[in-house]
Image: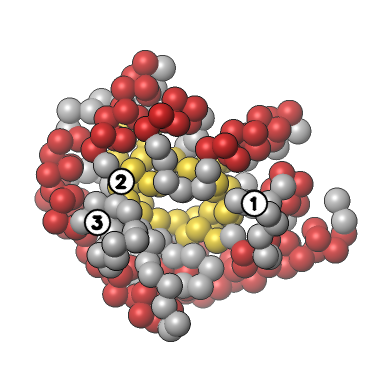
Amino acid sequence: MTDERRTAIAANLLHIKEGIRQAAARSGRAPEDVRLVAVSKNFPLEDVARAMEAGQTLFGENRVQELLPKMEEAEKMDLACEWHMIGTLQRNKVRFLAGKVSLIHSVNSLGLLSTIDRLAGDRGLVQDVLLQVNVSGEESKQGFSPSELPAILEAARKFGHVRLCGLMTMAPFYDDPEEARRDFSELREFRDRTVAREGLPSFTELSMGMTNDYLQAVEEGATLVRIGSAIFGSRIF
């Protein structure tokens, strides 16, 4: 591990965590209310280890084929990482993840939720998940529309091996990150209405905000922010 790379990652993490602390304070919350998901997509496990040296333990990956080798290698290196799946998940890949990641952020169909429930049940466990919501309505974005959520939540009542922990969204890329604030506030309002209507005690998480707009997301109630390039730099392909 080069000292220069280690120092850069540690400094980036410190800067981001200070930004989270200040944004949380502006919204009347404690910094502990917000967890940083370091997105290690396209970066080597050595960078994960460097981030862990700086105190980061939670990492997110977008692709199953990259996540699994990293998880296996991390175990061999005795790295006590927590892993989240944050990217699009195909139903035929669920068998590789159920029970291995602590949270799946990107449940975007009832069929996917059903598959996760079945495979988690086969393994005698409960898998924590978030429902992905397309708040902006962009055709390029995946996720449930807000109007679909009540029916999805009702259908999910029959599933005994998934725990609905909250919502995730990806805001469009705006030139001015302040424009993302309305998407984040809408997601928070959906979450709050759902908790009030459904009485789901576990439905607390809001996964929203990335490198360009995480400060606005925290101010609007994010509990999980997904940040990659601001920690690790330009992607290594």
Is 152 on the left-hand or right-hand side of 52? left
Amino acid under label 2?
Asn
Q: Is residue 188 above or below residue 160?
A: below
Residue 21 appears in the rendering: no
Is 147 on the left-hand or right-hand side of 201? left
| Pick the front one: 150 or 197 | 150
In the rendered image, residue 224, in percent from the top left (x then y), is placed at: 45, 56
Q: Where is mark 1, residue-wise?
A: 42
* Disc number placed over residue 108 in the picture, else none: 2
Sooner in the amino-acid sequence: mark 3 or mark 1: 1
At mark 1, the secondary structure is loop
In the rendered image, residue 157, in percent from the top left (x then y), is placed at: 17, 33
In the rendered image, residue 18, in percent from the top left (x then y), is placed at: 59, 71
Tell me the distance, in whole angstroms, between the alpha carbons under discs 2 and 3: 16 Å
Sooner in the amino-acid sequence: mark 2 or mark 1: 1
Amino acid under label 3?
Arg
Amino acid under label 1?
Asn
Q: Residue at x 37, y 32 (%)?
A: 91
* Disc number placed over residue 94 in the picture, else none: none
* Disc number placed over residue 191 in the picture, else none: 3
